[in-house]
Amino acid sequence: MAGMSAQKPADGQEQRARDMGMTTEALTGRTQQVFFEPSEEERFTYPWAADVDYNKRTEIDADGLTTTEVNKRLRDLMAEGFGTVVIQNPRGKHGLGVGILNRLNLIFEGSLGYFGVGLIDGPNVRITGRVGWSCAENMMAGTVVIEKNAGSTFGAAIRGGDLVCKGSVGSRTGIDMKGGTIIVGGDTGALSGFMMQRGRMVVCGNAGKNLGDSMYDGTIYVGGEIRSLGVDAVEAELTDLDRAWLTRKLRQYGLLPERGVDHFTKVVAGKQLWNYDNLEPNEKKLIL
Amino acid sequence: MCGIAGLIHRGKRSDVGSEMTAMLQALKHRGPDSTGFAVYGEPVEGDYVLRLKAAEQEDMGKGRGIDRIVDERIAEVERRMEERGAVIKARDRVRPHAVRYVLSHDGNTEALARYIEEVDGTEILSFGNGLELIKDLGDATRVADEYKLQGFQGTHGIGHTRMATESDVDIRSAHPYWAFPYNDVSVVHNGQITNYWNMRREMERRGHRFMSNCDSELLAVYTAHNLANGMTLEESLRRSIDEIDGVFTYLVATKDQLGMAKDTMAAKPLVLYESDDLIAMASEEVAIRAILPEEIDTVDPYDEEVRVWQA
């Protein structure tokens, strides 16, 4: 079972906060936040997660159901121990399959609308159609594979897992991503990787303008042309480790180009923006 | 937020009235304040369809003799039509405050339109050979029922569900906008135009009229201005990406074309479905699925993308 631990800022941080005139407040109310202790257990599951069996399979026909009804039925089935669920006729409905915090094989036979499979932690999802804006937003872990195209803000703020679109995606892919891997089989639009903080993004086709604008960290690999790099995004040398990782990941999802990965361009943060200077916050306030 | 939708059939006519209604009803959650349609039927050369409103919908419930006032306005409009040589072939009072005319007129349609709009409280919603422009408060089904849009046979159409953010909830601020005085051109828009006042002043200096304070009207006037100066629809759409600031995705329909343009940030959504005989687009795929429930391939157009399709 996962352990709970309170996060307390270090004394130095507290002191600096007080110096800047800020006050701190201990929140004593109920919270949904769960902090896992990696030392406790190898496989983490949420305390309320049902025990599911991947071999126990069922289907939901989403035709005529609302998003809420589909998601409620999905939760009920997981509580009954179903580990593989096929959802038929999703027909572009928004918000399907969100908030799944457990192991599950989830297959959508069709396309999803906005915010599909957002806020998930653990399931393996396959979507045979396309997805709308903000697919898998804030995903924590698991895999999501989309067979066709995806809309904008694909994988916004994801923290972990593999998010794969075999077609092309819209603009602002991986905006604010904090971990995990995004793989795009086709092209991506403008401002992809905007304010990216960690993780890896792979684009097998072309990338739009301002790629990696204001990225803090993380790595972007592009197989095609880059229309332009964003502020503080710079090209870096593709190392053997990069090649090995790219080959393994792309092969895993059937996206490895015939000519290999040597032609990929690697983009990282130049770390020259103002937020990388050594000024303390109170010194910065004086300058500004 | 607002929702926009459009479709064009290649080389055939269809019940675009019902199709657009289904698409816009699926987008109701993006904007419940008002709904508008611009649908294009078979153009009849020499005959014009003119749709006008003689009051705002909410004015009609206020009493104080508004029915009589509206009747007087409509009578004055018809007197002015006849004075300028227009022959009213058909007249349909589709709503207490809205009338549809079929006219024959040999003279200058812009001059006629300006003369009609001098009647207090009236606004021409559309004027052209093939365009029928309908807009009112309420969702798509309600507006389509009130204006008997279901079953309208045509080649293409665009539509809009509005969430009022920049201006009031009234018909004046509802989309689509007719590109006055350019016949048969209509525009729907999702977004915010940040250089609206500068561009509006520029257009007003050139003699164009604005009927609302809605920023989307600028796109209609801007398009009309460009087309009147000899640009093609595609050239006008491309130029707008450089000259119009803000975040926008907008659709323009002409007598036989449908075009789209997306701003430099690609900040406003559009999903596009393209086949040999039908092109459909909407803010969300769920609207396209309202008329095409089977599995289809759709794409998101990219930033600065401009497309034009021929009927």
Image (tube, rainbow, N blue to C red):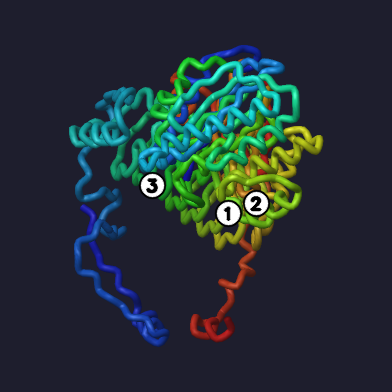
Where in the figure is residue B30, as x and y percent of width and height?
43, 40
Q: Residue at x 46, y 33 (%)?
A: B97
How many C-alpha atoms fall within 10 Å of the one at disc 1: few (<14), some, or many (≥20)?
many
Under circle 1, the secondary element is strand
Chain of the residue where label 1 is placed in the rendered structure: A
What residue type is disc 3 on?
Answer: Ala
The disc label shown at residue A141, or none: 3
Under circle 3, the secondary element is strand
Nearest to N terminus: mark 3 or mark 1: 3
Same chain check for tags 2 and 1? yes
**Looking at this view, is B121 or B198 the one in front?**
B121
Which residue is labeled 2 in the image? Answer: A266
Same chain check for tags 3 and 2? yes
Where in the figure is residue B239, as x and y percent of width and height?
74, 44
Q: Are marks 3 and 2 in contact (CB under 8 Å)?
A: no
How many C-alpha atoms fall within 10 Å of the one at disc 3: few (<14), some, or many (≥20)?
many
How many C-alpha atoms fall within 10 Å of the one at disc 2: few (<14), some, or many (≥20)?
some
The disc label shown at residue A206, or none: none
Nearest to N terminus: mark 3 or mark 2: 3
What residue type is disc 2 on?
Answer: Lys
Which residue is labeled 1 in the image? Answer: A219
Q: Are marks 2 and 1 in contact (CB under 8 Å)?
A: yes
Q: Is residue B36 above or below residue A4?
A: above
Alpha carbon distance from label 3 to label 1: 19 Å
Q: Residue furthest top?
A: B12
Whether residue A175 sits left or right of residue B256 in the image: it is: left
Alpha carbon distance from label 2 to label 1: 7 Å
Chain of the residue where label 2 is placed in the rendered structure: A
**Looking at this view, is B306 or B159 the one in front?**
B159
**Looking at this view, is A135 or B304 the one in front?**
B304
Alpha carbon distance from label 3 to label 2: 24 Å
Same chain check for tags 3 and 1? yes
